[in-house]
Image (tube, helix red, strand yellow):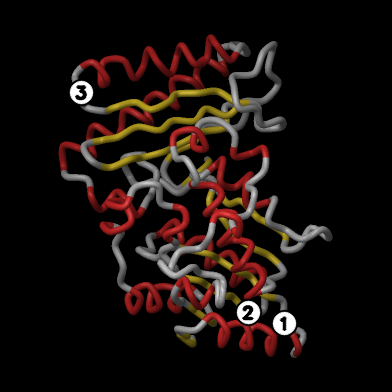
């Protein structure tokens, strides 16, 4: 496994691999790798001749400076974990290396250089994290330019983001964006780099999100197909934790996964995804579940 600190060098590595006829799988990350990330790397290694992993804490997608500054970073550890999982190349870099000659005098990327994230960015995360998806789309499109992979792997936990990144493909649909199931801890909590910042009590409080998603799934199984009714189930399940201050709820929403909308869909649904965002202590967590699919549990979808 090779570790490179220059995106241009990584681009040359990828060009050489492709010239040898190798398919490239790509896993973009912000580091602090956990089993969820490693599962993406293992899948890529199974499906591609070479697997490339980027580790870059992208300042463009943080709407809170404190969140960016507190994000855990240990490139050597991440590279070791990625290599053990099957990565052939891990690369990182600085913002000025990814956007050479494009930063202003303050070292920032001008807003006119940001990519439009498209309609999938409307509502929910797009509303609560202003500018977040523009930052995501901008860096993902740039990473795709450097790696030019055949396939790119993302986790389903960041559901709305997965819709946004598909818009970063070129007009021929490359790369093929593959969304992999959310992995969960033994408690059911969705794996996230942010979980490291939860104390013992907060980890227990975070499980209210899992309970609410299971309640919505049960309601769907019982025949509920109206988005307002299903959102009511989510709200009712979370109400005790909200009332006691164990969580601070930002949204508990239902969307049609086949046709994203900024607001709650009307009419009888044939498919649905439940999406949650809440703060537990100082940590912001998101989670989701497809209601029209089999129940989710430890290790992802069962």
Report how far apart the C-alphas of labels 3 and 2 lie in the structure.
47 Å
- Residue 100 in picture, x, y percent from top left: 55, 77
Mark 3 surroundings: few (<14), some (14-19) or many (≥20) residues within 10 A: some
Answer left or right for 102 relative to 167: left
Q: Which of marks 3 and 2 is in front?
A: 3
Instruction: Give above or below for 191 relative to 21.
Output: above
- Residue 288 in picture, x, y percent from top left: 49, 35
Q: Under tag 3, what secondary structure?
A: loop
Instruction: Give above or below for 270 relative to 16.
Output: above
Q: Earlier in the sequence, mark 2 or mark 1?
A: 1
Q: Mark 3 highlights which residue?
A: 245
Answer left or right for 79 relative to 11: left
Instruction: Give above or below for 164 relative to 177.
Output: above
Residue at the image point whose x is 56% and y is 71% from the top: 102
Q: Under tag 1, what secondary structure?
A: loop
Residue at the image point whose x is 56% and y is 55% from the top: 154
Mark 3 and 2 residues: CB-CB less than 8 Å, in contact?
no
Report how far apart the C-alphas of labels 3 and 1 lie in the structure.
52 Å
Q: Which of marks 3 and 1 is in front?
A: 3
Q: Mark 1 highlights which residue?
A: 22
Residue at the image point whose x is 59% and y is 34% from the top: 122
- Residue 220 in picture, x, y percent from top left: 57, 17
Report how far apart the C-alphas of labels 2 and 1 lie in the structure.
7 Å
Q: Mark 2 highlights which residue?
A: 50
Mark 2 and 1 residues: CB-CB less than 8 Å, in contact?
yes
Q: Under tag 2, what secondary structure?
A: strand
């Amino acid at each position: 496994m090779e570790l490179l600190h220059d995106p241009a060098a990584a681009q040359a590595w990828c060009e050489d691999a492709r010239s040898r006829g190798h398919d490239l799988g790509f896993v973009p990350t912000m580091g602090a790798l956990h089993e969820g990330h490693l599962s993406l790397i293992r899948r890529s290694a199974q499906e591609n001749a070479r697997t490339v992993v980027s580790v870059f804490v992208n300042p463009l997608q943080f709407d809170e400076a404190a969140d960016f500054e507190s994000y855990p970073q240990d490139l050597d550890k991440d590279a070791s974990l990625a290599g053990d999982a099957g990565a052939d190349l891990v690369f990182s870099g600085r913002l000025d290396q990814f956007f050479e000659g494009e930063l202003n005098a303050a070292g920032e990327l001008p807003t006119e250089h940001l990519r439009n994230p498209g309609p999938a960015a409307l509502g929910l995360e797009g509303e609560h994290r202003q500018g977040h998806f523009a930052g995501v789309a901008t860096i993902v499109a740039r990473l795709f330019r450097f790696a030019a992979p055949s396939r790119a792997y993302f986790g389903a936990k960041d559901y709305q983001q997965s819709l946004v990144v598909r818009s970063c493909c070129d007009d021929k649909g490359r790369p093929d964006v593959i969304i992999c199931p959310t992995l969960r801890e033994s408690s059911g909590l969705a794996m996230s780099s942010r979980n490291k910042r939860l104390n013992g009590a907060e980890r227990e409080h975070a499980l209210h999100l899992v309970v609410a998603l299971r309640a919505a799934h049960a309601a769907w199984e019982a025949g509920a197909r109206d988005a307002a009714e299903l959102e009511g189930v989510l709200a009712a399940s979370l109400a005790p934790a909200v009332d006691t201050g164990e969580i601070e709820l930002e949204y508990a929403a239902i969307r049609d996964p086949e046709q994203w909308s900024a607001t709650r869909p009307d009419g009888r649904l044939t498919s649905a995804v439940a999406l949650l965002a809440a703060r537990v202590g100082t940590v912001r967590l998101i989670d989701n579940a497809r209601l029209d699919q089999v129940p989710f549990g430890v290790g992802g979808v069962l």
